[in-house]
Image (tube, rainbow, N blue to C red):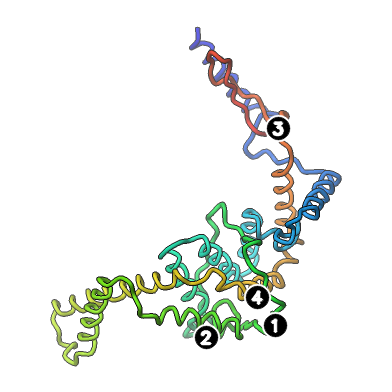
Amino acid sequence: MEELQDALEDAQYVNAINLDEGPRPITAWEKPSEEEMSNWKSGLKKVWNDDKTKDELPEPFTYDWVLANPLGLFMFSAYIKETSDDYVQINFIEELLRWRYLRGRSRGTKLREIYDRYLLPCERDEETKSPRRPPLLLIDEVDLEYDYSSIKKSGSCSVQEHTDESCRYCAIGIKGPLYEEIVTTLAEYLSKDSIDDTAGTDDMSTASSRHSEHELDPANDSIGEEKAHEVDTADVAFKKFANRTSSKILSKAPKDLFDKVEQIVLQIIRIKHWEAFKASSEWAKLINYMWHRDRKVEDEDFFLMRVLGRGGFGLVTGRYNV
């Protein structure tokens, strides 16, 4: 009898999801009325105004507010990458956020990637002479956001004074004393030769001496396969240790290293893309998402599907959030 009851409920479930008024994963979300949207916006602004720590929080519906939300940053970044070919600066900001989340040597490794990709002059295409930009990176995290309260706001800086559209100095298109300060600081970290790992130092010395010996040997041109293999092995060992060493040293770089330059790059991105984003359909979509996120969940939001099981404490019913 129970098997028959289960079969009937399965049939009812199939019929329910096939009805026009039944649940659909692609069912359009309810669009708020102008009054509902206005009340929600004014409510958010009132909460922000009444917050004693509002100086540490972004004002609702502003540029910083969008970046301080994972969904907002994702949609704004996607908009830039889909509507223009100007993705390097927003990728730089995303990489800085990832770098701040890391610890240990992985933090140093990420910093070295940032230095190599974004802070050095771009290589030039041999034919067009145009700069070869870093690869396009997409956000694949669900929690990447701009921590507004953790970054000390720098004083007013002239964006024009620090902008280099030719990317002659670095891939992110900035120049000036703030850029030079960062490059100098990182160069000092990379030039440090004080290493705590004594065994590692011996490995590096051995690999380095072998690498230099074969590289400077005039008879290198006529070495056999065995010698060539030794050269390759020494070269790989040397590079591996160099990378490991630089990662360890760079992991000690301060978190506020990029704060001032970050503000310059964010201002450049704002000037280029913010107003266009607010006038796009993506902005309206983002605001609707935010409204749905904050609205109260009610019983009417669910569709009764079927009884999933029975027990001593009653029935377990499957419901679908419409």
Cα distance in 3D space between marks 4 and 3: 44 Å
Q: Position of residue 248 (x, y in %)?
A: 39, 70
Residue 160 tag number: 1
Which of the marked residues, 4 or 2, is nearer the chain's N terminus? 2
**Sequence-first tag of 3 and 1:** 1
Residue identified by numbered label 3: 301
Would you say the residues marked 3 and 1 are in contact, meaning their CB atoms lie under 8 Å apart? no
- Density class for disc 4 (Cα within 10 Å; few <14, some 14-19, many ≥20) is many
How many numbered markers are drawn? 4
* Quadrant into which the C terminus falls: top right
Q: Which amino acid is tagged 4?
A: Ile
x then y, percent, for residue 168 = 56, 85
Q: Quadrant of residue 223?
A: bottom left
The tag earlier along the polypeptide, 1 or 2, is 2
Q: Which residue is the site of mark 4?
A: 264
Cβ atoms at labels 4 and 3 below 8 Å apart: no
Please name which of the two marks, 4 or 3, marks the residue nearer to the observer: 4
Q: What distance separates the C-alpha of mark 1 from that of mark 4?
A: 9 Å
What distance separates the C-alpha of mark 4 from that of mark 2?
27 Å
Where in the figure is residue 303, as x and y percent of width and height?
A: 67, 27
Residues tagged 4 and 2 counted as in contact (Cβ below 8 A): no
| Disc 1 and disc 4 in contact, CB within 8 angstroms | no
Q: Amino acid at mark 3?
A: Asp
Q: What is the residue that sits farthest to the bottom in this orientation?
A: 218
Element type where label 2 sits in the image = loop
First-in-chain label (3 vs 2): 2
| Front in this rendered view, residue 214 or 194 | 194
Question: On residue 129, which mark appears?
Answer: 2
